[in-house]
Image (spheres, rainbow, N blue to C red):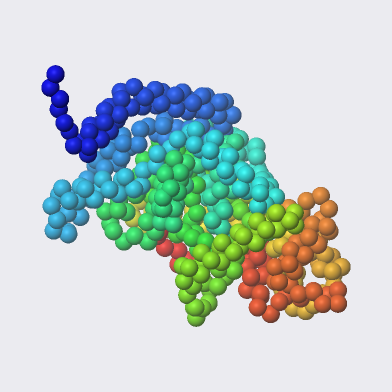
Amino acid sequence: MTQVSLPLWLFLALAALAAWALLERLLIPSVRWFLRRRINRVLDEVGTRLNIHIRPFQLTKRQVLIDRLAYDPKVLEAMEAYAEQEGMPREVAQAKVVRYAHEIVPAFNAYIYFRVGYWLASRLARLLYRVRVGFRDEQRLGGIDPRATVVFVMNHRSNMDYILVAFLSAEQTALSYAVGEWARIWPLTQLIRAMGAFFVRRNSKNPLYRRVLERYVHMATQEGVCQAVFPEGGLTRDGRIRDPKLGMLDYMLRGHDPSAGRDIVFVPVGINYDRVLEDRSLVRRLDPHAERRSRWFVIRTTLGFIGRNLWLMARSRWHRFGYACVNFGRPVSMRGFCAEQGIDPSRLPTGERFACVERFARRLMADVGVAVPVLPTAVVAQVLLEAREDLALADITARAEELCDRYAAEGRMVVMGGARGHTLVSALNMLVLRHLVVEAGGRFQIASDSLDVLRYYANSLLPIAVSASSTAN
């Protein structure tokens, strides 16, 4: 018998290849079959209770969707123009398109969405807040055409918005979000993509990228995928609802023919919190002269905040951050809007279509403003700001209850728990504990350096004033 000697590195390489072949031929197909069976079981279960069903588009293999997007006729046309304009070979431009498509297209996984994502979102939301959900017109929400594309249009107060709305809407549908560059970090990227979200480069001026993004949004809308959008384009800095940016809405409506195909139904969603975790940092950005914080400062502050709250939990002295509430307003049919205005967006010139989208965005944001819930912290903040002097506890609660009655008469959703007076006192105590309000001799007044933060909360109750300077995303 002849012996053959091999270097150790070659033996290890051959052993690794043999192990991979064994996995690929025997184990991986079994694992895929096991996972697919669990996913199908989840789809069968949730399919019996969802009001807005998961579309075949969402269950299509990701690579198929990437190829479909990369070779879309309008994308190819934009690619040719881009290659000629930039003086680059067609193959290089095509590679850019494929890279953009890989970046944008999600990889929706029903098991991760309804099992992992829902569990994490519900635990985190309920750990931090007393979560409440409202329906201003539940009967009309339930009466939406099952074939229609449903788009939830929301105000943007906190990064918790993604978690809160996904958790509260999971009994109705699976949402597809547009998320920014902040989420493109490992391993967050994989989880968010599996939850059905797609990544967007905010304020990108690249015409080729914008065309690829536009065609993906158009494809998803035409296929009936339920989506969630923040027309403001970013978090509010002063508590008011910001002017809408029209890019995403225009992408959805650009090729929409109201006389054929699916209707697009927009559902206004108002979100509010008794405490926004980022409130001080958001308000600070209003000051153009404020010193820029270093990344290390942000990390240190965040870890310190988490550490303090964990320490309070360990000593059984921790309390949740008040209410977090999502209120779903009255659905608005795009088909109905077009009939009312006598227009067809798919046939309008660019300028006229944009004016039409802007009018529609104004209407949606006004409905979102009405849907924003009235919460205790915002009411107490408004009372203190209007008084401009120190007040006794009885005066604060009396004026706050008058405000609550006024908002309720206007049709706003007022969230005050069982005993309104007790809830208002708890909100005031939370402001005192955060050193936003100072108590002296049984009277309360705003701390000298906290005026902007109190305005931030009170501004959530103000009427919507959307300026005419709205621009594309």
The part of the image, by quadrant, that contains residue 173 is top right
Estimate the x, y position of residue 360 in percent, counting from the top left: 49, 53
The part of the image, by quadrant, that contains residue 28 is top left
Give left or right: position of 137 versus 213.
right
Estimate the x, y position of residue 425 in percent, counting from the top left: 81, 62
Estimate the x, y position of residue 128 in percent, counting from the top left: 65, 52
Task: Return the residue found at the far top.
Answer: 1
In-front residue for pair 12/93: 12
Quarter of the image with the N terminus in it: top left
Give left or right: position of 224 versus 324.
left
Give left or right: position of 30 versus 145.
left
In-front residue for pair 324/359: 324
Quarter of the image with the C terminus in it: bottom left
Residue 180 in view of the camera: no
In-front residue for pair 421/350: 421
Which residue is pictured at 76% across the width and 75% down the height?
Answer: 438
Which residue is pictured at 53% across the width and 38% down the height?
Answer: 116
Estimate the x, y position of residue 331 in percent, counting from the top left: 57, 44
Residue 437 in view of the camera: yes
Which residue is pictured at 83% across the width and 75% down the height?
Answer: 443
| Above/below status of 343 relative to 109 | below
In-front residue for pair 375/409: 375
Which residue is pictured at 20% across the width and 47% down the height?
Answer: 94
